[in-house]
Structure formats: structure tokens, C-alpha cells
Image (cartoon, rainbow, N blue to C red):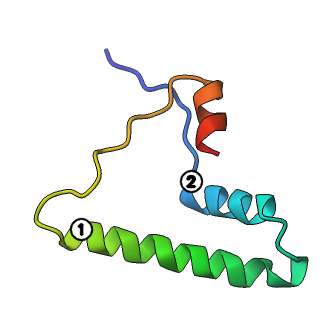
Amino acid sequence: MATGTGIGIAPSVMINRIVYDKNVPQSGHLLEVARLRGEMMQAQADNAASPLPTTKPAEPPVNGAEVDLLV
């Protein structure tokens, strides 16, 4: 029986953390989140429209240290 690592970060959480780490003023948080979300959605659409995948499938992180590197 194969089991996963159980480690997963939702895109919305990752985007919020990126905005927080950029030290965006509080009044601009929603705007920056919306901008990054739009970029992500556009990249996903471009990737889905290409005949061949432009990026290799993501492998789940093995441990907490790998998660920290991603964040």
C-alpha cells in the first residue's frame, strides 16, 4: 500500500506567504495577492495549452527542510 507524505501547501497559502515575505504594505496585500494569482493562472493556462509539458511534474517534498526551500 503506497502512502503519501501528507505534506502539501495550497497555492493560496504559498501566494500569501510570498506577499508577506516581500514586506508589501498592508494596504497593498490584496492587490499583490491578486496579481500573483493572475500570473499563476496564466502560467497554468499557457502550460495546459502547450502540446508538450513545459515543466516536469512536481515531486512532493520528502521532509520539512525541502518544504522550507520551496517557501
According to the picture, the residue beneath numbered tag 1 turns out to be 48
Q: How many marks?
A: 2
Decide which of tag 1 and tag 2 comes sooner along the chain: 2
Q: Is residue 59 above or below residue 39?
A: above
The local crowd at label 1, few if under 14, some if 14 to 19, many if 20 or more residues have their Cα within 10 Å, is few
User: What amino acid is at disc 2?
Assistant: Ala
Q: Nearer the viewer, residue 11 or 39?
A: 39
The x and y percentages for residue 38 are: 51, 80
Q: Nearer the viewer, residue 65 or 12?
A: 65
Disc 1/disc 2 C-alpha distance (Å): 19 Å
- Which residue is depicted at the point 27% across and 66% down? 47
**Pair 1/2: label in front:** 1
In this picture, is 50 found above or below 62?
below
Going by the image, does 19 lie left or right of 39? right
Residue denoted by label 2: 10
Q: Is 65 situated above or below 56?
A: above
Residue for point 73% across, 66% down: 19
For the N terminus, give its image quadrant: top left
Q: Residue 29: percent from the left, percent from the top?
A: 78, 77
Disc 2, SS: loop
* Residue beneath the point at 17% across and 69% down: 50
Q: Of all residues shown, which one is farthest toward the left? A: 51
Residue that appears at 74% across and 81% down: 30
